[in-house]
Structure formats: structure tokens, C-alpha cells
Amino acid sequence: MSDKNKIEMAEKFVKDKMARYDSGHDWWHITRVRNLSAYINEKENLEDPLLVDLAALFHDFADSKFESGNQAESVEQLSMFLDDNGLGTFSSRIINIVQEVSFSSRKKEPGVKNDLLRIVQDADRLDAIGAIGVARAFNYGGYRNNIIYSPVEGENRYSTINHFYEKLLLLRAMMNTETARILARERHEFLELFLKQFYLEWNCGSF
């Protein structure tokens, strides 16, 4: 089986799996992460492009936000697919990405030594900031029926705006590669600009 055929089979497998995810974690998110991963790898020259593409393609396959405690079952399902479709040589590295790429599973020690993880993690984090990141944050907030914002501290902890402070504004400093750090600057600035305008309008400062 050619690499092209393997990719096509993997794409169908992922599309079927992610059909129930929200639109911030849908096929287009996967596409953007694949493109960003390829770009970062091209600039940094760190890994086999085929492996990078496959790792980016599968990176959200066992996302805890949608798996309801069934991550181990999803990982086993992925492992079987890779073995059955001529991708078994990549299995352990791809599964490592699936298990380690998310913000919630980040290691406490500084620095990521795994080049493949550095690439895909950066791409995934870049897609969480900037204009796309703002859109995805509010889309997921709506999916979870979270409030947009509240000036009451106890209520605001469950808001989408609070998510900016708990995660999104932290991501620029967490990029692994120089290429991602460059791309993150403008996206981070957009988050800050958005929040400034949001508070201005919330407090009626534009009138």
C-alpha cells in the first residue's frame, strides 16, 4: 500500500471518529494543525514529514473532553488501526502524541525533548490562539453551555473569558520551537486586543 493510500485511509478513520466532536475540534481543526505542523517541520527540519502528518492527523483521537473516560479504549482502537494498515512502525510515536499533546497533560518539567511532540504540540497550541482561537473558545463554551463572562468572581471562573487567563494567554510562552514562537506573537497580541475591546464594550466605554 502506498503512503498516499495509507493517508487516505487514516483520514477517513479520523473523520468518522471526530464526527461527534464540536466544530472547534472538527476536521478543519485537524487540517489546520496538519498544515501548521508541516510548516514548522519544514522550517525546523526535525522529523520525517510523513510521520509529522500522521501524528497531526491523529493528535485529537483520544481527547479527554469528548471521550468520557474512554481514552484507553480509543488508544487501543488507534493502535489496532495502525497495525492493520501498514503503519505499525509509527504506532508508539503516534500514540505518544495522542497521550501527551494536550494542555491538560503537559509535563511539569521545562522543555520537551521529543521533536515530534514539539512540532505537533506547537501547531495545536497555535490553533488555540489568535482569531481562530477566539472563535474556537466561544464555540466550545457554547457547546458546554458556559457563560461568556460575569463580573462576579465566583461565577466568572466558569466563563469563556476566564479560559483566556487559565490557558490561552499562557500558550505563547509555552511554544517549543522558534518558528512557533514567531507565529505566536501576533496571535497573542490579537487575544490581548480582543480582551481590551471586550471589556470596553462590557463596561459601555465605547459610548
Image: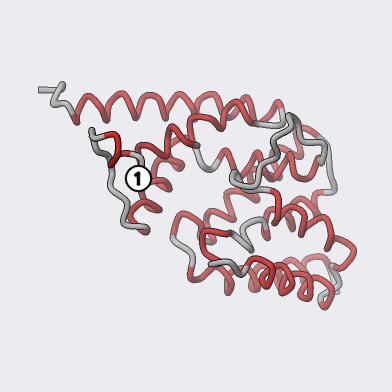
Please tell me whether residue 111 is drawn above or below residue 146 in the rendered image.
Answer: above
Q: In front here: 146 or 188?
A: 146
Indicate the quadrant containing the C terminus: top left, top right, bottom left or bottom right.
top left
Number of numbered discs: 1
Q: Identify the residue at the far front of this view.
A: 154
Q: Quadrant of residue 162?
A: top left
Q: Is residue 15 above or below residue 198?
A: below
Q: Residue at the far bottom: name it.
A: 84
What residue does disc 1 label? 158
**Counting other residues with Cα less than 10 Å from the Cα at mark 1, is it few (<14), some (14-19), or many (20 or more)?**
some
Q: Report whether 92 appears left or right of 125.
A: right
- What residue is at 44 percent from the left and 61 percent from the top? 22
Residue visible at 67% across and 43% down? 121
At label 1, the amino acid type is Tyr
Q: Quadrant of residue 10?
A: bottom right
Q: Position of residue 148 (x, y in %)?
A: 28, 44
Q: Nearer the viewer, residue 148 or 180?
A: 148
- Name the quadrant containing residue 196: top left
Left/right placement of residue 111 relative to residue 124 reads right
Q: Residue at x 65, y 51 (%)?
A: 34
How are the colours assigned in the image?
Answer: secondary structure
In the rendered view of the protein, which quadrant contains the N terminus?
Answer: bottom right
Residue 50 in the image: x percent, y percent? 80, 55
Q: Secondary structure at mark 1?
A: loop
Q: Could you tell me residue 198's position as x and y percent?
A: 27, 30
In this view, the residue in front, 195 or 13, is 195
Where is residue 175 shown, x and y percent of the image? 65, 31
> Which residue is rendered at x = 52% and y = 56% of the image?
28
